[in-house]
């Protein structure tokens, strides 16, 4: 019966991870619950051992992901003050448009809210997810 309970716990944690993206972190716990379920079915672990194993796997998995994420290309989102882009789709009245930056098309927002025409040069000030914040290049 215990393996089925752990399987249900894993299913609930996976469901929470998928449906509530702002929560985060449940994927590791769900995987730990799956491992505990399998080991309990195979080895017949006692409840205290199951709980300790679940806690250890959850903490170790979370720590491993944290270490891995810190080793991923540090500074890849860093933007140099001299980074420039070119407007490829004119900016609307709300200051939103598209620019070509580092060879790719990006959604962009003008920090001054101005209209910018295609071909205009802009300075990339910051990257927020998949959107760039830009200023008109005053050169």
Image (spheres, rainbow, N blue to C red):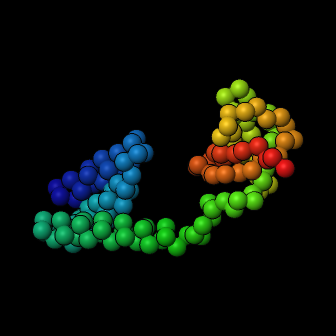
Vertical placement of residue 64 versus 90, above or below? below
Q: In which quarter of the image is residue 62?
A: bottom left
Q: Residue at x 87, y 41 (%)?
A: 119
Q: Which residue is drawn at 66% across and 47% down?
A: 132
In the picture, which quadrant includes the N terminus? bottom left
Percent across and percent down for residue 91 are 75, 33
Q: Is residue 41 left or right of residue 14?
A: left
Q: Nearer the viewer, residue 105 or 25?
A: 105
Q: Could one spot residue 139 in this view of the protein?
A: yes
Percent across and percent down for residue 12 are 30, 47
Q: Is residue 16 left or right of residue 136?
A: left
Q: In this view, does 136 lie to the left or right of 36?
A: right
Q: Residue at x 39, y 52 (%)?
A: 24
Q: Which residue is drawn at 59% across and 70% down?
A: 73
Percent across and percent down for residue 43 are 21, 72
Q: Quadrant of residue 20?
A: top left
Q: Residue furthest front?
A: 138
């Amino acid at each position: 019966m215990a393996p089925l309970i752990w399987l249900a716990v894993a299913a609930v944690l996976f469901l929470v991870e998928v449906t509530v993206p702002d929560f985060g972190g449940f994927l590791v716990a769900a995987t730990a619950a799956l491992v505990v379920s399998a080991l309990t079915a195979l080895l017949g672990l006692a409840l205290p051992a199951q709980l300790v194993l679940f806690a250890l796997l959850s903490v170790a998995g979370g720590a491993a992901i944290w270490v891995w994420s810190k080793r991923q290309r540090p500074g890849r989102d860093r933007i140099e003050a001299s980074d420039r882009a070119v407007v490829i789709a004119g900016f609307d009245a709300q200051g939103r448009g598209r620019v070509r930056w580092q060879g790719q098309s990006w959604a962009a927002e003008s920090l001054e809210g101005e209209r910018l025409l295609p071909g205009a040069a802009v300075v990339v000030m910051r990257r927020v997810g998949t959107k760039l914040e830009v200023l008109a290049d005053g050169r």
